Amino acid sequence: MRGRSGRVARISAPARLGRRALFEGVLGFGVAPALGGVVASLGGCAREDDVPKADPPGSGWMRYARIAGLDLSDPDFDAAPALDAAVRAGVSVIEGDSILSDYASDATFDLEVRRIAEYARSCHARNLKLVWYYPCLEVVTPDGEKPGVRSLYKDHPDWVQVSIDRRPNVFYGSKEHWVDPFAESAWLCHNSGYREYFFERIRKLAGAGLDGLWIDVPLFMDTVLRWTCLNRACLDKFRADTGLSAESMLEDWSDPVFRTWVYWRHEELTRFCMEILAVARSVTPDFEIVFETVTMDTDIATVQGLDASFRTFELSKPLASAEALVLAERIDRVWELDSVSNMFGMRPALADDWLCKVRGAKFARGCDRPRPSWVFSYGAEEPDAGLAMSLLCATGCNPYETKTPEMTTTVGAAFRARMFQFIRRHAELLFDAEPSATVGVLHSSSSRDYVDRGPVDTAFFVSAVNEVEHREVYAADKSFFWGASLRDRTYCGDYGGAVKALSHLHVPFAIVPLQTITAADEAYLRSFRLLVVPSLQHVSDLHAEMLVRYVASGGRLLVLGQAPGHGDQLGSPRPEATRLDRRLGFDAAGGAVSIGGKVIYEPALLGREYLLREDAQALAVFEAAVEDAGARRVTIDRREHPHVHVELARHAGRWVLHLVSYAGAPAALAVKPGAPAAYPFEHDYAIVRRDVTVEVTVPEAIKGATFLSPDRQFDAAEARWLGGGKVRVPLFQYSVVVLET
C-alpha cells in the first residue's frame, strides 16, 4: 500500500478488475470446492532438469536478494515462462501476489494455500525463493458495500480499529486506488478477536513450503480517520500496560495520556510484528517474514503508528495469550520508498527530492543494521528507474524492481536484466561491505512526534502538492505526492536539511535512528567521530546518558535547534537539571556555544535553513564540525559537482567508493502551457555525464583501482587511477571505484 498520497503498490487496477469476474460466485463463502480441480493444473511445474536455474540461494539469500513481483492470482495463469524469465534476468526472490487481500472463507483460504504450495515447488525447482504477499491489518471485501453481501465488518464489527472520535475504521470503494468501487476496506485491531483468526492463517501459510511472507500494512490507517486504535481490546490493554485510561481521551498534545498513547502505539505494532514472526517460526523454524514499511522516517509514522526504529519495549507488554511466544530479536523489513509521482515516477523530481530518496534508504539501513534492507525501487522509465536502483545499491539496500506504482510489473525486461546481473556479479561488494562513515545523523522518533505533532499532510519529499496551493501541478498530475513539503516541517525539515548538507559536503555519513540504540550499542556510537543532532527536543534518560558518555569518551556533537533534551521520550517536560543541555555542560537559553570543541550548540535550525536556501553560513557550520572532528571526507569539487552523493565502505581489505549522480534532475517543477500532454511537465530527468576527480584519504597505501558501473554508457577504459586515493571517473548515474590496498 501507500501512504496519505492515496497510491497503490499492489496489483494494478486493470488486473484486479480482470480477475474480479473469476472470483464472483466462486471464491465466496461455502463454494470454494468449485476450484478444487485447479490446483493440479498449475503452470510452471515442469521437471527440474527442464527449467533454467538461478544460482543456489544459500543461507544468506535474504542478504543478497534481487526481488521481483509476480501476480499469481489467476488459477489459469501459466507461471512457467514468467519464472524462467525471472531466472534469466537475475532475479533471486519472487514476491507472489494473489487473493490474500480479500475476505475469504476458511475453505477458500485453504485452497489458496494449496495453490501457493504448488508455486513454491515451482520456484524451488529454479532455485528461486518465494515470499507471499499478505496484508495483516486490512481486509478487503469485494462488493462489501452492497446489501446482502457478507463482509468482514458486517460479520465482525468488534474486530475493527476505532478512532479517537469513536468511529470504526472502515471505508468503501475508491477512497484508495486499490479498493474497487463498492468494495469494503476494513482495518483491524491487532488485539481484538481478529488476532487469533489471523495467526491461524499465518500458521497455515508457514507450513505451505514458502520461504517467507511479505506482510503489509501493520499500521493504523488514516485514509478516513485519524488516531486509531481505540478498540475496546486496545483500551483495556493500554490501561493494563500503563495504568492510564484512554476512555475519554482526545487529540491533545498537552495531555500526558495522549502523548503516552502515541508512544505506546509504536511499541504495540513492533510487538505485533515480532509475534507474527514467532507464530510462523513455531511452524517452520527458518521461516522469514519481511514487513512492508511505508511510514519511513517522517511524520506519517506518528499518525499511522508504524515506526521501524522501535526495537525494545518500555510500555507495551505481551498479552496473556502471547506469553509463550519467543520474540525475535529483530524483524526484517521491505521499505516502500516512494516516487514523487505515481504516473511519472521520479522524472519530474528535483535534486532535493532525489536526496530525500537517499535519506530514506539510509534511514532504512540505520534501522535494519546488521540485517538486510529490502527497498522498493520504483521507476517510470529506464533513466529514473536506473538512478533509483543505483542509489539503493550504493547505500547497501536490496532493490525490489518494479514500475511505479505497482508491485507486479517491471520497467522493462532488458533494464531488469542489466541491473540485476550487475548486482549479482558484485553482490559481496554491495551487501557485505562495512560502511566506513565516521559521521552520524541522529533521528529521534520522539522529537518528530512531539515537535511536528503528526500533521494531516505528509512530508517526505521537498516537492509535494495539493489542490489549493499548487493548482497547476495538481490538475496536470493528480498522482503527484500529495501534502506539504518537507521544508514546512520543523523537526523533519531540520533533520532532512542536515542530511542534505552532509551529502553536499561529500561526507560519508550514517543515519542513526536513536530508537534503535540500546545499552549494548555504546561501541557503535563511539565509531563516529561526530554526531549531528538536529532538533533533539525529546530524549530518554538512557539515550541522554549515552550521549554524555559519548562526549566523555572523545566523541563530538553538533547540536541544533531549540530546547535540546528539554523533554523526555514521552513528551513530558524535564526538570532543569536533567535536560540534555545541562548534562552536557551548557544552557541553551544562552545561545550558541562551543565547549572545548567537543559540543557545538547552535539554537538556529541550521539543517532547515540549508534545506530552504542552501545557506552558506549554515553549511560552513557543518563543514567546520566535520573538519574539527577529523571525520573522513571524500574530496570532490563541490561547486562543479554539487549533485554527486558519495558512500564509502570497506570490504576484504579494499575500499569501495560509490558515486551517485542526480545532476540530471530538473531545476524547477513547472507545468507545460496548454492542455497536459503525455508528460505534462516542462522539465524531465535526463542522464548527463560528469567527469569527476575524486580523492579519498585512507590509512593504507593504494596500489590500484578497479572501476565498475551498471550504466550502459559507462566505459571503464575512460577511468583513470591517478595515484594514491585519487581517481578520475566518468559518471553518468552510478560508478563504483574499488581501491586496492
Image (cartoon, rainbow, N blue to C red):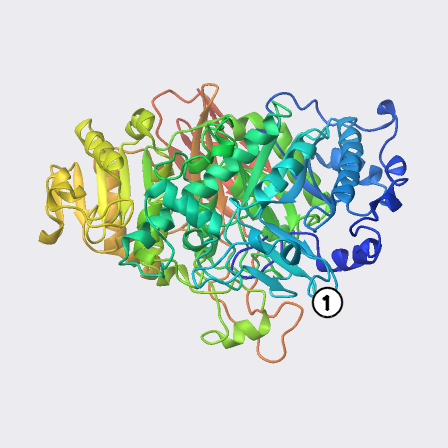
Q: Which residue is painted at 38% across and 42% down in the image?
A: 240
Percent coordinates x, y for residue 71 in the rendering: 75, 46
**Mark 1 surroundings: few (<14), some (14-19) or many (≥20) residues within 10 A:** few
Q: Which residue is painted at 63% across and 58% down in the image?
A: 185
User: Amino acid under label 1?
Assistant: Pro
Q: Which residue is painted at 83% across and 58% down in the image?
A: 21
Q: Which residue is painted at 64% across and 24% down in the image?
A: 284
Q: Can see residue 305? A: yes
- For label 1, the SS is loop
Residues 176 and 348: in front is 176
Percent coordinates x, y for residue 99 in the rendering: 73, 48
Q: Can see residue 93? A: no
The quadrant the C terminus occupies is top left
Residues 23 and 586: in front is 23
Q: Quadrant of residue 544?
A: top left
Vertical position of residue 321 compared to residue 11: above or below: above
The residue labelled by disc 1 is 147
Percent coordinates x, y for residue 237 in the rendering: 42, 44
Vertical position of residue 705 compared to residue 240: above or below: above
Image mark count: 1
Residues 660 and 306: in front is 306
Q: Quadrant of residue 314?
A: top left
